[in-house]
Amino acid sequence: MALSRRQFVGGAAAVAGAAGTTGFTLPTGPADPTGPTGPTDPTRRISPTGFPLPTPLWREFESAPCTHPQIPYVGRAGAHAGARRSPRPPVVANAVTYGATPDGSGDSAPAINRALAEAGERGGGTVLLPPGTYRIDDYLRIGHSGVVLRGAGSGRTRLIATRSLTELIGPYGSRYGGDKSSWSWAGGLIWLSPQARHASLVAAVRDRAWPFEGWTGNRRDEWTTLTAVRPARRGDRSVTVEDPSALTCGQLVVLRLADDAGHTLLEHMAGGGPGAEAYTWDDKTKLTSYVPYEWPVRITAVRGGKVTLERPLPLDVRPEWDPRLVSGVAPLTHSGVVGLTLEAVETPQSPHLLDKGYNGVVFQCAYDCWAEDVVVRHVDNGFGLVAASACTLRRTRVEGRGSHHPYFCREGAHDNLVEDFRVVARTVPAPAGTQLHGINVEGLSSHNVWSRGVMEMGTFDTHRGMPFANVRTEITVENNGRHGGDGSAGPLYGARFVHWNVRVTNGRAGLVKIDTVAPYSATVGISEVREFDQTDVPDFSGDLHARVEAYGSPGSVRPGNLYEAQRALRR
């Protein structure tokens, strides 16, 4: 039986501070000796002083951090390679001086948007929103790099959004046909995306052209080849290129890998082997629309034909995949939203896939961007990462009447960090026909991290489209949501998915204990759980090469947070 809100909050008190703090620590007491990780369990290792020893999996990873078969390297996930503090660019504008009214008496969206646009045109800087309540009858746009919208804190600066994206832009249908609303997984009432990409997307929506939201455009041909790349292996930090003349230190490029007729790239993302080779890929039309795989990365050094990258390669680079470094749309970089609450006017949640677009904060084609101390309330979808990479969401919270996707990560979003997050239990019952997912990842998204979270509702929504190499660590969850995903989107999981130190408060296994469904995965230090409600079967036949350690003992596993341990290891 699911816990009540009072029971959940009481049980989570040991693992979570008040919302808006810098995080929490899972309990570290000994496991129940009668449980599956008692003294006879070889995965539970205790030092002479009584403290848990590092797991065998972690010891393996330490010896091969970039090439481990089950655990991905995510130690540099997040903006500015996971920097602890977000940049604070100088203040260049106060939205009140542009006409924003902090007493909620008028529409402040035009004034705030003018301040944001002028800050960007002058080269960037911070736009302040002093304490108060601001009504916005339009969505807010950050389309220039280096622009930060900063309130006085999520408890002091409040935006009241009165209209949905359907009202403001138009009905956004699906490029896959039918009457689905793409506002169910795209667009925000605070929307950070490059001006050119944003303008083309809005125009396409109004023309019913249903654009592709990713880095290289609707036809996947809006890119310029900088150079071909010679063969390399997953985990390499440097690659050899054929022509370095167009490359410079600090440049942001996109590694582009195309699939071949035998779908060996997709097989590689699934971990390879007989299971992936036997899988039928050709009829997975939604999945195959996600390739070429596009991985944005910053160059840190160019020495002749040798190019060093900010992060290790996420996949092999093989000649049959036509590997190239390309430049697509100009990205949005070094921009953020800090210290405010965005509250949509409270309306009933829409039926599944018919969301109106009362969405929160969305990053699209963004790199090295961030949100910090931001709350969204009464939204259809909370925080979105759409073809966004190397972004950080820190101390964020989704609350109110209930959301379709509290957090969504899609269209090839990579290397993002969501930490110290909270999904608050809904304040009204879910209307009939609605759906609750949770922390969502799909569409070949890889190397994303969710760390130190409390989920009073939702689930670990892996939404098909074969996301791979993602980590969820040090999280408490009332596992009462359901995953989605079109059958044409292919497998639920690719290789190297990890759930590490997860406390499940209602005992439901689905999408948390993944050793029976995810290939080359690791389930480490989760609560004892059982299957009920939505139960999945593996997409791949044969041995999945999945690992389980410290089952039934959340909080006893060392390291307690896989991402933090990898950060420490990189130093």
Image (cartoon, rainbow, N blue to C red):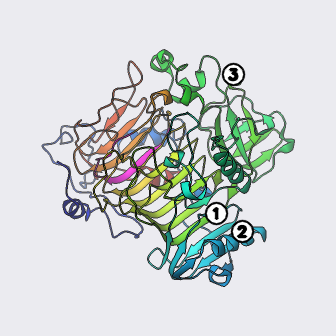
Residue at mark 2: 117
**Element under label 3?**
helix
The stretch in magenta equals 469-483
Residues packed near mark 1 inside 10 Å, few (<14), some (14 to 19) or many (20 plus)? many
Distance, label 3 to label 2, CA atoms, is 44 Å
Residue 320: mark: 3
**Whole-percent x, y for residue 214 in the image:** 64, 43
Q: Check the image and report above or below for 285 versus 134.
A: above
- Residue 80: x and y in percent read 62, 58
Q: Is residue 475 magenta?
A: yes
**Mark-to-mark CA distance, 1 and 3:** 40 Å
Q: Amino acid at mark 2?
A: Ala
Going from the N terminus, do you reach mark 3 or mark 2 first? Answer: 2
Gap between marks 1 and 2, in whole Å?
8 Å
Q: Is residue 9 visible?
A: yes
Q: Decide which of tag 1 and tag 2 comes sooner along the chain.
A: 2
**Coordinates of residue 257 in the picture (x, y in percent):** 67, 31
Which disc, if any, is residue 141? Answer: 1
> Which of 503 and 196 lies nearest the eye of the viewer?
196
Task: Name the amino acid type tagged 1.
Answer: Arg
- Other residues around mark 2 within 10 Å, as few (<14) / some (14–19) / many (≥20): some
The x and y percentages for residue 57 are 39, 39
The residue lying toward the viewer, choosing from 218 and 464, is 218
Closer to us: 56 or 495? 495
**Image quarter of residue 213:** top right
